Image (spheres, grey):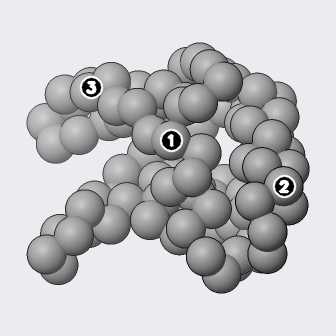
């Protein structure tokens, strides 16, 4: 996959997340060194290079976290619908 195709995929990811603003999603993020975060949250904003989510942590604590669209492209971040557990971006793209 060349650079232009990756840019188009990132744009499609951004547009889909813009449609999901205000939607509760399940997030799974690989932070490296065997650290994986799994929590639920709401998409707040979608900017040209990143998106922001409010994530519900332990004991009712809410954290605001930002991720890049490339994190979804590389599989570092996975988003899925809470009710159906269906992946928001089902196609895994190889880097």
Gap in Å between the C-alphas at discs 3 and 2?
37 Å
Classed neighbour count for the residue bearing mark 1: other residues with Cα under 10 Å, few (<14), some (14–19), many (≥20): some
Relative to 11, is 60 above or below? above
Q: Residue furthest front?
A: 3
Label number found at residue 39: none
Q: Quadrant of residue 76?
A: bottom left
Q: Name the residue under label 3.
A: 62
Mark nearer the viewer, 1 or 2: 2
Q: Residue at x 75, y 59 (%)?
A: 3
Depth check, front residue: 93 or 64: 93
Depth check, front residue: 65 or 80: 65
Gap in Å between the C-alphas at discs 3 and 1?
20 Å
Q: Name the residue under label 1.
A: 68
Label 2 secondary element? helix
Classed neighbour count for the residue bearing mark 2: other residues with Cα under 10 Å, few (<14), some (14–19), many (≥20): few
Q: Quadrant of residue 5?
A: bottom right
The C terminus lies in quadrant: bottom right
Task: Please state the horizontal and vertical placement of residue 78, each as a whole percent of the image.
Answer: 54, 62
The N terminus lies in quadrant: bottom right
Label 3 secondary element? strand
Q: Residue at x 62, y 20 (%)?
A: 47
Task: Count the labels in the image.
Answer: 3
Can I make out residue 86 in this image? no
Mark nearer the viewer, 3 or 2: 2
Label 1 secondary element? strand
Q: Name the residue under label 2.
A: 4
Task: Please state the horizontal and vertical placement of residue 49, each as a whole percent of the image.
Answer: 58, 30
Q: Are marks 3 and 2 in contact (CB under 8 Å)?
A: no
């Amino acid at each position: 996959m060349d650079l232009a195709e990756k840019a188009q995929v990132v744009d499609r990811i951004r547009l889909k997340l813009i449609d999901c603003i205000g939607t509760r999603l399940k997030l799974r993020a690989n932070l490296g060194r065997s650290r994986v975060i799994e929590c639920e949250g709401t998409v707040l904003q979608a900017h040209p290079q990143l998106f922001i989510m409010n994530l519900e942590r332990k004991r009712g604590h809410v954290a605001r976290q930002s991720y890049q669209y490339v994190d979804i492209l590389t599989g570092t971040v996975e988003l899925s619908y809470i009710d159906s557990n269906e992946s928001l971006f089902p196609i895994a793209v190889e880097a």
